[in-house]
Every structure is written in structure tokens, then in C-alpha cells.
Image: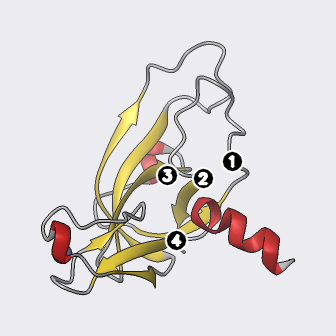
Amino acid sequence: MLPRFWRKIKYRYNLVGTKCENCGSIYYPPRNICPECRRKSRMVEVELGERGRVVTYTVIHDVPESSKLMKPYVVGIVELDSGARVTAQIVEDPERVEIGSRVRAVFRKYGEEGEDGIIYYGTKFVLDE
Ligand SMILES: [Zn+2]
């Protein structure tokens, strides 16, 4: 992949967050300022890794008819092995997802669900098996 292209899409397709070196908090999506430290913020980019576990999840049954999302679909909070928490769609059959399930990030084309789809920064998770 061309480096210039990669830089442009980094935040959409890769799990890069920011860490405040003052207090150690990690943010995803990245923030320029740490809400805890404000003017003392010292933000640096960190790779968050792509694997983690499901902390909690919700099965969403109410999907607009026009949406191309599969129905029902799962939205969860994933705690990555780096400690950062990410809210994202888990692209699996709801019956297979459990609290504690190991998952890994996949990077789907941004916006493929259409206008009414819920899109979380292009990052989705699948079961890591
Ligand atoms: Zn901070």
C-alpha cells in the first residue's frame, strides 16, 4: 500500500489511539486533548493491537428496512489486550457472541452499510477462533 494513502486512512482502518503520557489514559478514537489533564495533556499515538475480548454487547433487532446491515446485529464494547475499550459492531451471529468471547478487529470498507447504517470508525470485530 502506498504510504501516503496509508496515512490518510490510518484512523479509519487501523486501531491507532492516543495515549496521554501525563496520566496514562488511552483514547480511541484518538483525541488531541486528555479530558482529565487538559492543558497538561501530552498525547502520543499508540497502536492498540487488534485482539481483545467482549466486555458487554447488545443485540439490535430494530434495523431500518433500507439498511444493508444483517438483522439482527450485534454491537459490543471490546476491551483490547492493550487495555483500550472500543465500541463496535461484532459481525457474527448473535447466538455465538458471549461476554468474554475473544475477538479480533477487521477493517471493512468505510461506509458500506449505507447512509442509515451505524458505522463505528470502520472497525468491526469477528470472533477470534
Ligand atoms: Zn491525561
- Tell me which label, 2 or 4, sits earlier in the chain: 4
What's the CA distance linking mark 3 and mark 2?
Answer: 12 Å
Q: Quadrant of the C terminus?
A: bottom right
Up-down relation of residue 44 to residue 64 (above or below): below
Amino acid bearing label 4: Leu
Disc marking residue 90? 3
User: Is ligand 1 less than 8 Å from the beta carbon at label 1?
Assistant: no
Instruction: Please name whichever residue, 107 or 6, is drawn nearer the observer in this view of the structure.
Output: 6
Marks 1 and 2, the one that precedes in the sequence: 1
Task: Estimate how packed mark 3 is, as few (under 14), some (14 to 19) or many (20 or more) residues with alpha carbons within 10 Å.
Answer: many
Q: CA distance from mark 1 to mark 2?
A: 5 Å
Q: Position of residue 20 (x, y in %)?
A: 26, 79
C-alpha span from label 2 to label 4: 10 Å
The residue tagged 4 is: 15
Q: Amino acid at mark 2?
A: Gly
The residue beneath circle 2 is 122
In the rendered structure, which amino acid carries the disc numbered 1? Answer: Tyr
Q: Which residue is label 1 attached to?
A: 110
- Do the CB atoms of the residues marked 3 and 2 lie less than 8 Å apart? no
